[in-house]
């Protein structure tokens, strides 16, 4: 018996949603740090090899598992694993594909609420002002104190009671996320992705232009920063830790193995090309 399921409205919406699921702190913050710590420009060699040999094949496997689950009327790793492997243990292994996204949602919702709160105070002029100084520690100190105040954390790592607005913005963020999920795949996630993803690229371009126009108090500019990040150290390629870091970064960039892509793929149409969709989603992430 075929169970009718909701489908993505358009291929573009699907690709943007899959990309939106993967694009995040792992792309904007983690990738530059990994590159700088693991050979600079040379890091791209093990990264691209890991992408081709590990990332894309695993991505296709998740898409295929999602399509299989769709035919059975299910979209979770629990059900898919239970169908594929007739063993009582299978569904418990598949539960990891539910537990991991759930864990990510718990802490990402809190991070989203911080971002919303920070944006609000930025618009009303409530952020601290800092003098231009060569001392990075003094420059960042007011922002650190602002963060500690709003999150209820002290410099020693102890958690105190956050102010009222922290709880308020967390509640607002939670309600927004729940409403999007309530609207469903096409009317909820896809619609938001079609708006949010172009905005992310626009803001990334604005941020890039802003970085290109910045200079530090000691006269250094963005070229010095790019040199620090991308000057290749090919001797790092002999270090197994660099290759391991590259493979790990690929998993972060593509969100492979988290279980979310499997669920997204379970809502594709029967004749959708999963190989093309997987490559398109990976290309947007990269």
Image: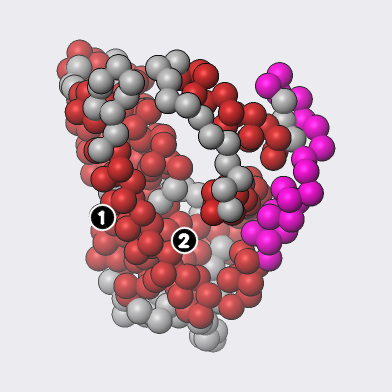
Span colored in magenta:
155-175
Q: Quadrant of residue 245?
A: top left
Closer to the chain start, of discs 2 and 1, is 2
Left or right relative to 137: residue 199 = left
State the SS at label 1.
helix
Label 1: few (<14), some (14–19) or many (≥20) C-alpha neighbours in 10 Å: few
The residue wearing badge 1 is 283
Name the spot of residue 70 as percent of width and height, x first. 48, 74
Q: Which residue is mark 2?
A: 262
- Taking the spot 29% from the left edge, 34% from the top edge, the residue there is 214
Tell me what residue is drawn at x 59 percent, y 78 percent: 183
Can residue 93 be seen by looking at this rendering? no
- Say left or right for 165 vs 178: right
Give the number of marks.
Answer: 2
Rounded to the nearest angstrom, the CA distance separating label 2 from label 1 is 18 Å
Q: Residues within 10 Å of mark 2 (few under 14, many from 20)?
A: many
The N terminus - image quarter: bottom right
């Amino acid at each position: 018996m075929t169970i009718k399921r909701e489908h993505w409205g358009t291929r573009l919406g699907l690709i943007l949603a899959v990309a939106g699921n993967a694009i995040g702190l792992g792309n904007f913050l983690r990738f530059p740090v990994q590159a700088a710590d693991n050979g600079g420009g040379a890091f791209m060699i093990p990264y691209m090899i890991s992408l081709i040999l590990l990332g894309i094949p695993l991505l296709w496997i998740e898409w295929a598992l999602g399509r299989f689950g769709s035919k059975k009327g299910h979209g979770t790793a629990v059900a898919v694993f239970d169908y594929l492997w007739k063993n009582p243990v299978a569904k418990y292994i598949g539960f990891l594909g539910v537990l991991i996204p759930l864990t990510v949602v718990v802490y990402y919702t809190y991070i989203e609420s911080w971002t919303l709160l920070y944006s609000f105070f930025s618009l009303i002029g409530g952020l601290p002002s800092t003098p231009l100084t060569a001392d990075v520690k003094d420059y960042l100190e007011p922002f650190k104190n602002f963060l500690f105040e709003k999150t209820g954390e002290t410099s020693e790592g102890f958690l105190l009671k956050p102010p009222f607005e922290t709880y308020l913005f967390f509640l607002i963020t939670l309600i927004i996320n729940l409403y999007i999920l309530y609207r469903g795949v096409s009317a909820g996630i896809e619609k938001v992705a079609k708006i949010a993803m172009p905005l992310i690229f626009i803001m990334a371009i604005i941020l890039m232009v802003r970085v290109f126009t910045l200079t530090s108090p000691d006269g250094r500019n963005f070229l010095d920063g790019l040199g620090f990040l991308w000057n290749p150290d090919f001797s790092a390629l002999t270090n197994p830790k660099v290759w391991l870091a590259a493979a790990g970064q690929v998993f972060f960039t593509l969100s492979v193995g988290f279980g979310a892509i499997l669920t997204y793929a379970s809502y594709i149409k029967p004749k959708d090309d999963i190989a093309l969709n997987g490559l398109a989603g990976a290309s947007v992430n990269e």
